[in-house]
Image (cartoon, helix red, strand yellow):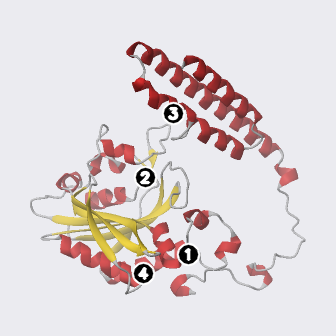
Amino acid sequence: MLDQLQALQATALDEVRAAVDVAALDVVQSAFLGKKGQVQQVLRTIGKLDPKERGPVGRAANEAKQAIEAALEARKAELLAAADANLAETEWVDATLPPPAGSRASGRGGSIHPITALVRDMEDVFLSMGFETLDGPWVEDDHHNFGALNIPPDHPARDMQDTYWLTDGNLLRTHTSPVQVRAMETRKPPIRAVCLGRIFRNEELDATHENTFHQCEGFFVDRDVSVGHMIYVLESLLHEIIGPDVKVRLRPSYFPFVEPGFEMDVTFRGDWMELLGCGMVHPYVLEAGGIDPNEYSGFAFGMGIDRLVMVRHGVEDIRHLMSGDLRFMSQFTGGLEG
């Protein structure tokens, strides 16, 4: 096993040195350090080894991982420096050329991005139900992103969210739920509010997962709030956004900041697709926001806006939405403003 690790490390370092751009480095990183990468595969087998071998193999695997990470960072810095040095040659623009066909300057206007259009439509629906729209920082602290939401440092729920941690101990927010905590800290019930914004998770990209996407967080805190109020609000929203014929279902689920918790699915291409999580606000979360859980209750929900766009427009791959591909964007006319 030790020989295998040495050979794996040598191969990875050779591929890092051979990478000619950052995209090639990303491929190497995924192949060796990703969730399904070769180093991770070795780590999964340690438990099957003889107890005397586990320590040396574990240390060797971690050393290989650190060596590969250091090589990746160094090579990436080299490639970025070289790219910056060549900008004058590779990215110059001839301002005398006529504008491309389809651009605003050529006489044809652009269109509103389908995510922007959906956000505006959702805001209109929520405002009609008496909710206010809030915003919060993208760079969050541990307390608002995790601690105040009943997710202490040793809580397994942290493993459910692959987090971008910053060197100063802060992080890129993994959900819009911190806005809920900040609102409760500064407002008194009744509170009806939503936050529609960008969030960040270190996800492996595929047709239904992105590392930068958009989420809608909503919550309602008052006396005698029930699950029935939550279902009414969510069904009303989805009927307005997707259509009156959309079918929904509620399934029991677990989220540390609500109790009880549920997931709501919607019909998509003849099957059920998970769309949002919801539930009654956990008493601990109310207390962390300075609200007495013996006097008040509330519900909260969070949904992926990008997935809702997929349902609304029949988009099969979530990565199209952030691609910047004008051929894809030209299909949309901007929702209600089209």
- Please, what secondary structure does the residue beneath circle 4 have? helix
Distance (Cα) linking label 2 and label 3? 27 Å
Q: For mark 2, what is the residue?
A: 174
Going from N to C along the chain, the mark reached first, 1 or 3, is 3
In the rendered image, residue 96, in percent from the top left (x then y), is placed at 90, 71
Q: Tag 3, which secondary structure?
A: helix
| Spatial CA span between label 2 and label 4 | 25 Å
- Residue denoted by label 4: 241
Q: Going 13% across and 58% down the picture, which residue do you hit?
A: 292
User: What amino acid is at disc 2?
Assistant: Thr
Query: Cβ–Cβ below 8 Å for labels 4 and 3?
Result: no
Classify residue 169 by image quadrant: top left
Compared across the picture, whether 324 is left or right of 148 comes to right
Residue under circle 3? 41
* Whole-percent x, y for residue 110 in the image: 68, 80
Q: Mark 3 belongs to which amino acid?
A: Gln
Indicate which disc, 2 or 3, sits on the residue closer to the N terminus. Answer: 3
